[in-house]
Amino acid sequence: MSKPAEAGIWRPKGLIAVLDTSTLVRAWLAGLGRPSPARDVMRLAGRGFDSFTSPAILEEVEAVLERPRFSATRDQVRLWLDVFLRTSRQVFPQAIPGQAAAAVHGDLADVPMLTYAAPVEFPEVAAAARADAGWFLVSENTTDFSPGWTVWGWRFTTAHDFLRLLAGRGARE
Amino acid sequence: MIAGILTRDQLDQLHALVARLEHQGILDEAQALRDIAQAVAYGQREVPASFAAQLLHVTPQTIRNWVRAGILAGSQDQTGHFHVQLDELEPTVQLDHATPDVSAEFGDITDAEIAAEIAAVRAERRRSATPR
């Protein structure tokens, strides 16, 4: 009867999200056995929303999971992140405006997610969102970031709240 | 898993994942994967919305909404049922396959503990970046 969308070519989903280090680490630690909003969000990257990430975020995830507390091997983590990367678009350092992260004061200035959220003004990224789209930073770190806080147009949210947002997409009024 | 065709490796991956899910008692998702494997074996390019919902951990209504809105690639048949293209589900199968079985070890870890490990990595990075 109808055929709303074809696979194979990239179609903007109308909603962009960057999953931060805490979300990806939480997704890893959930394994297969436990319900986890972080893992569910990661599994929907590229399908329910357009996922953007960066080498800095991925390297930080690797470094955290390799710490003695988690003892993951680099090969394991890279294999896992490689799959995630296939459903995401990368933003590289050369695309970052100089000193962009300086807009965030204190220790937050070296948070990769914030540094890489800056290129939102770049046409390539902005074009991925429709007029009614939202740009989200998905973080499980609610100590440093309050859900609803906005930086450069990006809104912080938790994985749990982001899933609820995704579930409501496309629903008829 | 390219529409209707599975390589030997992909088929092995799928069956290995089904076995792991069953071992962990995640039976609904394992069954959804079996259904998908059967659809592939029959040369189908799409699976019912309910299969996709089970695999993606969302409701069938969400899948229908996404297909209708063009968010997810799929179609609606003449009887009104929605279907999702198999290609849309491939990354989830691959991600699950690459996900380690660590939930028993870290299932109770707190957000604060994770934040502390991340903070330690950032502190190390700052130290190594600071000229002596």
Image: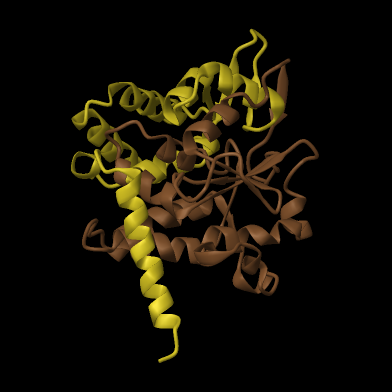
Chain colours: A brown, B yellow
Q: Is residue B76 above or below residue A153?
A: above
Nearest to the observer: residue B26 or residue A17: A17
Nearest to the observer: residue A137 or residue B110: B110
Quick check: A156 left or right of A62?
A: right
Q: Is residue A49 above or below residue B130?
A: above
Quick check: A163 left or right of A70?
A: right
Q: Position of residue A53 (x, y in %)?
A: 55, 57
Quick check: B24 left or right of B43?
A: left
Residue visible at 54% across and 43% down?
A146
Nearest to the observer: residue A150 or residue A90: A150
Q: Position of residue A152 (x, y in %)?
A: 70, 54
**Which quarter of the figure has residue A38?**
top left
Q: Position of residue A37 (x, y in %)?
A: 43, 34
Q: Is residue A154 above or below residue B24?
A: below
Quick check: A122 left or right of B74?
A: right
Q: Is residue A87 visible?
A: yes
Question: Quadrant of the image for the N terminus of chain A?
Answer: top right
**Which quarter of the figure has residue A96?**
bottom right
Q: Is residue A10 above or below residue B19?
A: below
Residue visible at 30% across and 43% down?
B110
Residue visible at 49% across and 29% down?
B43
Residue visible at 71% across and 49% down?
A153
Question: Quadrant of the image for the C terminus of chain A?
Answer: top right
